[in-house]
């Protein structure tokens, strides 16, 4: 059963990772046109390698046989010894195939474990196999196994090739079928969300599906259309008489048809659409379905008689006709076409007149106008200098420092290119599939405690000093089995009274923390829930600083804590530049702009509001919720690095410098003046942005051991991205992060020099953080010492 290891379109962000198996059993690519449904190729989604969970209480020849078989088949294999660890492992990795030892009931109840796994939402498409004893006498019924949720049984046989053959049959049979079902659900979800009107009919042209966009455009309800033949739906009289016959003649031959077609809406109005009809070839090489994609033309379908007269003429004539309609008293179609330059000149003249008559004037426009006026009466050297000023002001990157030559510091150059740009655009077929996964269901017996009082002592002990900057998040990660966000979140949110502010029960907050943490990818070496917990910890620490408390209101504190918790949810472990280069669905959705940050913010609210059990905002007053929501979104978007210097410079100029001036003029400055700087709405926004930015990239200011740990994790994530870029033939956005040649000390020195020092100088001047600045100094010296010794590693070699 072709272990179509799931792309997890509905469960987690999925992308092709890992090496393709070179064994003969690997699913092969086919050159057939995928949408025409070659039965061999199936869905046009490429599965990754199969994930297998082996549940055996003790290691024996049977478990060893399956381990060997998984290795030979290039499957990713996990082993569990107890039902609890098996369930935990399954909830984290969502295996395609689970093999449970059913031979020894004294160790654990295999059928009960199977039922527990089936209770998890994401197990719907998982294949579960029971390993049973060889029967002594008569064959036992398989019904108890089926009732428990098993798909099939395997009669014990420790022979390695027997295990290997069983896995191959499972992979090419049931696992592949389940993958197609899972992918099919995802594809229909995409159809439901599509903004293009889509209609699917049977081979006999009976309507089987229309999506919400179709209902919206055509005015019909789905129930009014499904089951009807196409010919029963009213047609527009505006189409040429033989157009339908032409279309049918084309698609019945298995060819795609595309063109302009008038459809009649339910209210009788005719709407002109671009239409693309694709036959889907199914079993036996016959047409099984027709898929029609329709999108309206952009001119509101108002085609007057002059346009109809020139429909058969060139596209230039059609465009000219539209200009004629829009500009009364202008040239007619023929004169515009023959004297294009005159028409173009006249159009540009009227456009410029409209621009000059606009009353909207941005501050930067006022500045440029003042400089222009000053130039007229200035001597030549001053006028030339002002020309240079104008040239700078007209760029969009007013806050980003300009680097020297490209070869000056390749590490800094690559970090800036990788973190502060949206990547090179690539006009290719490479696509990086990214869609939102569903929240995981967590069985009650494995759920996090209902209250702080129920936290296990060993976990509570690791959180005793969570209010200290030197708190060790890595210890908490280990104690919680990679679930630090839920536990630390419960404690910090309790300390800040978040439940009381939101008027939500603690159980709702716990469920929310669980589902947010479940949507972080534990497979990422850096951008996982431990990073989120680390940023939450730093945020809470900064919120306790006196200046920050003077500046922010309770709603700002709650927004900051929630934003920190969700700021990287569903992060795929790749940068924005990578997603843009790969043509990912998210990059397309968000127009290559702040792709991940927009996704994190949007998904956080989708997850929160779709289920009352975890909707922490449910009891808020509407206006207060809107204010809180806007603050959270603004803070999450502030973590995007392309506007790093803009945020830092605004903070310095609007807060640091005015406060410094007040202090110089009168000791601590006039209290009212200081208060007005700290609490103005604009400056509170700048404080919140700076706070979460510093929390997000505070690793170089942590104690040395934590700094080294985080440096290793982010480097590994960048190495993995470079590996994948090379594998997929994408532009390599950070070439220095090649695992074979990279100097980690150099990359840390560049990151601290370029991004960290100025930002934390400004934040320290505001919030007073001498301990962080000391750590930063120590860590910089550590990396510099390694670099001076020409070492590329995280640590020096043992003495």
Image (cartoon, helix red, strand yellow):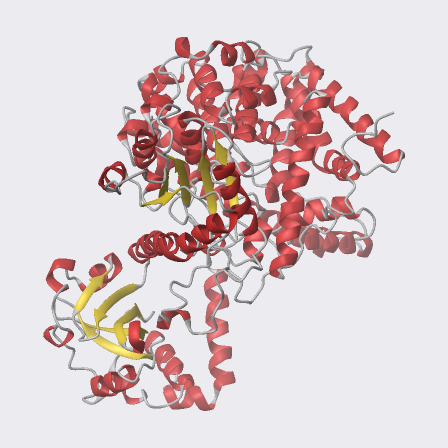
Q: Of 233 and 328, which appears nearest the observer?
A: 233
Residue drawn at the location 23% of the way across and 77% of the way down: 262
Q: Is residue 197 above or below residue 549?
A: below
Q: Of 666 and 789, which appears nearest the observer?
A: 789
Q: State which quarter of the image contains the C terminus.
A: top right
Image location of residue 559, percent across then percent down: 44, 26
Q: Residue furthest right?
A: 789
Image location of residue 577, percent across then percent down: 59, 51
Q: Is residue 691 above or below residue 467?
A: below
Q: Of 457 and 246, which appears nearest the observer?
A: 457
Image location of residue 707, percent across then percent down: 69, 26
Task: Tell me which corner region of the image, top left, top right, bottom left or bottom right, holds residue 504.
Answer: top left
Q: Residue furthest front?
A: 137
Q: Is residue 676 above or below residue 395?
A: above
Q: State which quarter of the image contains the N terminus.
A: bottom left
- Please say whether residue 419 is visible from this viewpoint: yes
- Please say whether residue 521 is visible from this viewpoint: no
Image location of residue 130, percent across then percent down: 36, 40
Residue drawn at the location 29% of the way across and 55% of the way down: 192
Task: Tell me which corner region of the image, top left, top right, bottom left or bottom right, holds residue 794.
Answer: top right
């Amino acid at each position: 059963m072709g272990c179509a290891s799931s792309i997890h379109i509905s469960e987690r962000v999925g992308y092709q990772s890992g090496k393709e198996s070179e064994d003969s059993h690997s699913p092969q690519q086919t050159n057939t046109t995928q949408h025409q449904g070659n039965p061999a190729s199936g869905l046009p989604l490429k599965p990754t390698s199969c994930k297998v969970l082996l549940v055996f209480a003790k290691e024996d020849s049977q478990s060893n046989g399956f381990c060997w078989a998984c290795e030979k088949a290039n499957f990713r294999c996990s082993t569990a010894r107890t039902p609890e660890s098996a369930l935990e492992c399954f909830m984290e990795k969502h295996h395609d195939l689970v093999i449970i030892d059913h031979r020894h009931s004294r160790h654990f109840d295999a059928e009960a474990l199977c039922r527990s796994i089936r209770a998890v939402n994401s197990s719907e498409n998982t294949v579960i196999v029971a390993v049973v004893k060889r029967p002594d006498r008569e064959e036992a019924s398989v019904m108890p196994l089926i009732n428990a949720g098993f798909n099939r049984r395997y009669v014990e046989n420790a022979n390695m090739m027997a295990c290997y053959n069983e896995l191959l049959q499972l992979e090419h049979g049931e696992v592949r079928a389940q993958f197609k079902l899972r992918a099919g659900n995802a594809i229909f979800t995409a159809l439901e969300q599509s903004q293009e009107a889509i209609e699917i009919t049977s081979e006999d042209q009976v309507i089987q599906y229309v999506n919400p966009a179709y209902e919206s455009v055509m005015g019909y309800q789905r129930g009014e259309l499904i089951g009807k033949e196409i010919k029963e739906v009213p047609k527009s009289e505006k189409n040429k008489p033989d157009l339908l016959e032409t279309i049918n003649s084309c698609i019945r031959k298995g060819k795609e048809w595309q063109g302009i077609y008038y459809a009649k809406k339910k209210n009788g109005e005719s709407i002109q659409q671009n239409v693309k009809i694709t036959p889907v070839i199914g079993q036996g090489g016959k047409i099984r379905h027709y898929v029609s994609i329709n999108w309206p033309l952009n001119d509101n379908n108002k085609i007057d008689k002059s346009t109809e007269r020139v429909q058969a003429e060139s596209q230039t004539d059609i465009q000219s006709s539209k200009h004629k309609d829009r500009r009364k008293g202008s040239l007619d179609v023929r004169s515009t076409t023959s004297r294009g330059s005159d028409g173009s000149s006249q159009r540009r003249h009227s456009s410029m007149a409209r621009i000059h008559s606009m009353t909207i004037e941005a501050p930067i426009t006022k500045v440029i106008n003042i400089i222009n006026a000053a130039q007229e009466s200035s001597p030549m050297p001053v006028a030339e200098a002002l020309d240079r000023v104008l040239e700078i002001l007209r760029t969009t990157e007013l806050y980003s420092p300009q680097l020297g030559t490209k070869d000056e510091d390749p590490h800094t150059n690559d970090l800036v290119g990788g973190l502060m740009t949206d990547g090179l655009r690539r006009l290719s077929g490479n696509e990086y599939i990214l869609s939102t996964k569903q929240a995981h269901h967590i069985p009650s017996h494995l759920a996090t405690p209902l209250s702080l009082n129920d936290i296990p002592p060993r976990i509570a002990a690791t959180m005793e000093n969570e209010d200290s900057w030197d708190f060790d998040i890595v210890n908490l990660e280990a104690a919680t089995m990679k679930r630090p966000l839920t536990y630390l979140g419960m404690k910090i949110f309790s300390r800040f009274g978040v439940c009381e502010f939101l008027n939500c029960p603690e159980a709702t907050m716990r469920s929310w923390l669980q589902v947010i943490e479940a949507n972080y990818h534990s497979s990422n070496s850096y951008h996982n829930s431990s990073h989120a917990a680390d940023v939450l910890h730093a945020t809470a620490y900064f919120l306790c600083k006196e200046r920050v408390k003077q500046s922010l209101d309770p709603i700002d504190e709650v927004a900051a804590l929630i934003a920190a918790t969700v700021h990287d949810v569903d992060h795929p472990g790749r940068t924005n530049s990578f997603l843009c280069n790969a043509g990912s669905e998210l990059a397309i959705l968000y127009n290559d702009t702040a792709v991940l940050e927009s996704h994190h913010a949007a998904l956080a609210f989708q997850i929160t509001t779709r289920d009352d059990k975890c909707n922490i905002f449910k009891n808020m007053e509407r206006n207060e919720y809107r204010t809180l929501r806007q603050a959270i979104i603004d803070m999450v978007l502030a973590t995007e690095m392309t506007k790093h210097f803009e945020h830092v410079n605004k903070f310095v100029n609007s807060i640091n410098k005015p406060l410094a001036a007040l202090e110089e003029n009168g000791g601590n400055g006039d209290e009212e003046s200081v208060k007005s700087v700290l609490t103005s709405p604009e400056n509170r926004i700048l404080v919140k942005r700076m706070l979460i930015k510093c929390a997000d990239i505070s690793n170089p200011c942590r104690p040395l051991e934590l700094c080294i740990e985080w440096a290793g994790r982010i480097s590994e994530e960048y190495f993995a991205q470079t590996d994948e870029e090379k594998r997929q033939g994408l532009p390599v956005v950070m070439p220095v992060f090649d695992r074979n040649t990279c100097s980690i000390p150099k990359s840390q020195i560049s990151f601290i020099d370029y991004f960290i020092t100025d930002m934390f100088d400004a934040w320290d001047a505001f919030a007073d953080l001498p301990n962080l600045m000391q750590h930063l100094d120590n860590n910089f010296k550590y990396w510099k010492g390694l670099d001076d010794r020409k070492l590329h590693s995280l640590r020096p070699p043992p003495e």
